[in-house]
Amino acid sequence: MVHGKLIDSVTLGVALLTVSAVAVPSSNVTTHHYDNLRTGWNSDETLLTPTAVAGGSFTLQHQVSLDQQVDAQPLLVTNQTIAGGAHDVAYVATENNTVYAVDAASGVVLLSRNLGTPVPMSALPGGCSNNSTVVGIGGTPVIDSAAGILYLITYTFESSQPVYRLHALNIDTLQDTVPSRVISATAVLTNGQGYEFTPGSSRQRAALLLANGNVYAAFGSFCDLSANTSRGWVLGWQTGTLTPLADSKLTDTLATTPDHFFLTAIWMSGSGLAASAAGDIYFVTGNTDPNGKENNHITNISESVAQLSDDLSTLKSIFTPGGATDGHAILDERDEDFGAGGVMLLPPQSGASSNLAVAAGKAGIMYLLNADNLRNGATTVIGNAVSQVKIGGCWCAESYYTGADGFGRVVSSGGSNVIVWKVEAGSKVPLVKLATSSTVANVQSPGFFTTVSSDGTASGTAVIWAVGRPASSKPADINLYAFNESGQQLFTAVAGAWPNYSGNSNIVPVVANGHVYVATYQQLSIYGLGSGTAAPSSGSIAPTKLTNSIAAALPVGQHEIFGTVQSIDGSTIMVVTRGGDLIRVDAESAFANFLAAQPAVGHGILIRGIIDESGVVHAETLLHAKDNPLMWQPDQ
């Protein structure tokens, strides 16, 4: 089944070659999670059936060396003339600001281009370590296959200052089709004062969107630091010329808050801004001032799913959770970002009176929403979900496919399990749980990304692919999984490594044309049917042999300590170290200088500061740490 007009960023066709009389699919993957709805569904995969994947012939084919960590999802264009021949090409962008064009079958690097010096971790607010040692291309690029242009955003260090640039590269040559555009923006706050985009405290993590003749990008923060200057943005540019749109969306336009803490960031674990068939833009925001009183649903839209007009001028509707345990005030106070997950739009569903969407975040609740009116007809400012179910904490996004019975399926991946939900729109229980997978090894953060491949809606052909996060720091392996639609595991293997195990790995498996692509730290792994390789390809890196110290370079006399928050009294925090010791942390300086992410009792924390003679740690920086000590880097 071809997605038709609803999925305009996946070009589907049939190649002339055959394998055992089965047509080899020829699919392009030109955007994050395959399409602008962000379904993650390739419905034209005839080779990777559940039987083939589980049969022992699905193996690692190639490992391709890259120059840095990969946070962006690989993209794919078939039958392209490049480097003197016709190739299926996988495009991979690294945090070193390097773009690779790789032969999608052989793993040979056809072209590569570096687009400038990346920003070092030391230049980020508070030395934010939830990244690679450098930050370059973080958000997944997008390809306009008709025009032959790849759009991406680099983060470069120019004259010792961070700069964001939007590029339009020819996919045949990787050269700029027009001069790159330095990203800037202005907005007006509630007191009438102007506010300017600040590249030094803004992180471009969400995948780019190509829709309505425009390229859109969203921005968030680095580790919730510099919260006095960092705010969420949605910006847009005309394709081809890179001319900025007249309007942009600043998610928090408040002039003041009690704690001078703004944010309302858009990062969605790297998931992309979504676009409906009508061209509206959708995204999810994170936390703002922890006092829990600053969301007003108009000038500060924290902890919300938002629907914007295509020109970014109008906030058309908004959904903000309002429950006793998941309301925006609770989420803000506890830093349980709704915006840790992305939003997925569903294709039209039988029995539904509107288009539908799903979204979930750290609180672990997946909401089924009216995508045409996110308030679902409510007269109050707090939106009403069509339905909601518990899935586990979601640093992730959902996937979708249509079953053989004609009903839609939502695939959630919160916590450590894949769950398949049948969509029965119009019924009293519109989400019916059909299957739960075995555990996906993962202690870095709850949740993970999935994709789905199938031969249309043919019965028994769907395969759910998942990439688990590291389950240990020794080694910090990345694992590829495959499940059938009943949740039975078909395949698993180590697909790479993530030396920055205290950061986030938001890896999306790309499945197309009989291959699976997994990009991790300094490598691209290519899987397919056949004998595979007994050892890594020449010049590539064995996944379990990687090293990458993410530790901050500390000034003389300063220490870095991981622990778990036991109690908070103003700026005094009691922390239990990995060794079981109880230490007192004076965080007054960190809070005053906006170098403190909001701590929470029972959760992990990273303290950088000086220890006085009485053993009190005077924190200059407070960062979130993973709750599991296995994900803590060594103390310094």
Image (cartoon, rainbow, N blue to C red):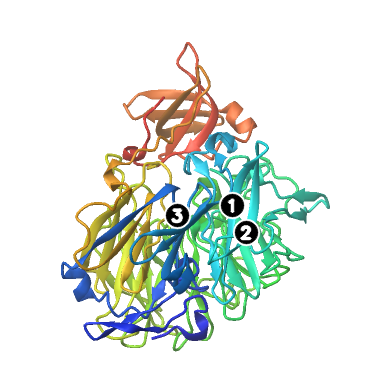
Which of the image's four quarters has the N terminus?
A: bottom left
Q: Dot 1, how many residues are within 10 Å of its Cα: few (below 14), some (14-19), or many (20+)?
A: many
Q: CA distance from mark 1 to mark 2?
A: 8 Å
- Residue wearing tag 1: 154
Q: Are marks 1 and 2 in contact (CB under 8 Å)?
A: yes
Hey, which residue is sitting farthest right in the picture? 192
Residue 420: x and y in percent read 32, 72
Mark with earlier residue (1, 2): 1
- Residue 371, placed above or below residue 159: below
Regarding mark 2 in the picture, which secondary structure is present there?
strand
Hey, which residue is sitting farthest left in the picture? 56
- Residue wearing tag 3: 362
Q: CA distance from mark 1 to mark 3?
A: 28 Å
- Residue 619, placed above or below residue 472: above
- Residue wearing tag 2: 167
Q: Amino acid at mark 3?
A: Lys
Residue 615: x and y in percent read 45, 16
| Residue sitting nearer the eye, 105 or 421 | 105
Q: CA distance from mark 2 to mark 3?
A: 33 Å
Q: Amino acid at mark 1?
A: Thr
